[in-house]
Image: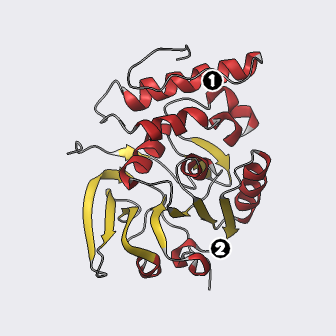
Amino acid sequence: MRKSIIVFVSCFLVAFAFASNNIPSYTAQAAEPDESKFFSLRRAMVKEQISQPPDYRDPVKDQKVLSAMLTVPRHLFVQPHNISRAYGDYPLPIGYGQTISQPYIVALMTEILEVKPSHKVLEVGTGSGYQAAVLSILVKEVYSIEIVEALGEQAQERVKRLHYSNIHIKVADGYYGWEEYAPFDRIIVTCASTLVPPPLLKQLTPGGKMCIPVGAQYSVQYLTMVEKTSNGDIRMRKMLPVRFVPLTRALR
């Protein structure tokens, strides 16, 4: 059972190579000095923040998740002036009042979803596209929705440039999901909602899981696991207290 902690994250919201039995062994694919440096920073991030965190956080143990976190170049998902801080243990601003989430929370939410290579995943809250990129390594298709038009367009350009061909992004109100491509095996929501949106429940396949922070903006929220049984019943389980910014809705 995970410890009761508060993880401060947002959806709109140290540097040396190491050898560890908990982290897959990789060789940097590029000899460029900067790429070698960033690879070393990613290895340190995965070990020191995620697989062997130094504080109260439970370690992320799924080797496939750790590999994905080690693979995705986080420094290419932050603003240029924050590249030197890309692998820090905190969220960073990405413009428009939003942030790229803390690496640990990205890894944690990915792990608890228990994704499989055959899965089709819906993400609500694209942001810079980082969470979608991590998921794209682990699943068949990622469908991601961003309500901030500029962020959605930037994320589309970014994932195309980085050749994440199984990520599909649209600008829309994520509350309503993406009915055209439903149902989804997994749904991840990276903004807090006061309730689990009924359209998302409808678009979750029987046997599917959704990870979503539930609660009001100025109170403790709970990272909640939602499961739909094979006969369509809904079961919800609180995982741990967190604090996310609220799910932004389109004006109607």
* Count of marks overlaid on the render: 2
Q: Residue at image x 30%, y 52%?
A: 241
Q: Is there any visible trace of residue 200 in the rendered image? A: no
Q: Residue 197, how many percent across, how many down?
A: 43, 77
Which is nearer the eye, 101 or 202? Answer: 202
Q: As displayed, is residue 205 above or below residue 90?
A: below
**Pointer 2 residue:** 172
**Pointer 1 residue:** 39
Left or right placement of residue 219 versus residue 171 in this view:
left
Q: Residue 101, how many percent across, how many down?
A: 53, 45
User: Disc 1 versus disc 2: distance between alpha carbons?
Assistant: 34 Å
Mark positioned earlier in the residue sequence (1 or 2): 1
Q: Secondary structure at mark 2?
A: loop
Q: Residue at image x 65%, y 35%?
A: 73
Q: Is there any visible trace of residue 149 in the rendered image? A: yes
- Mark number displayed over residue 123: none
Which is nearer the eye, 181 or 11? Answer: 181
Q: Residue furthest left?
A: 1
Q: Residue furthest front?
A: 118
Q: Residue at image x 49%, y 61%?
A: 119
Quadrant in which the N terminus appears: top left
* Amino acid type of the residue that numbered disc 1 sits on in the rendered structure: Phe
Q: Residue 206, how many percent across, how many down?
A: 36, 75
Left or right placement of residue 81 versus residue 112 in this view:
right
Q: Residue at image x 62%, y 86%?
A: 252
Q: Secondary structure at mark 1?
A: helix
Q: Residue 48, how many percent across, how many down?
A: 43, 23
Q: Do the CB atoms of the residues marked 1 and 2 lie less than 8 Å apart? A: no
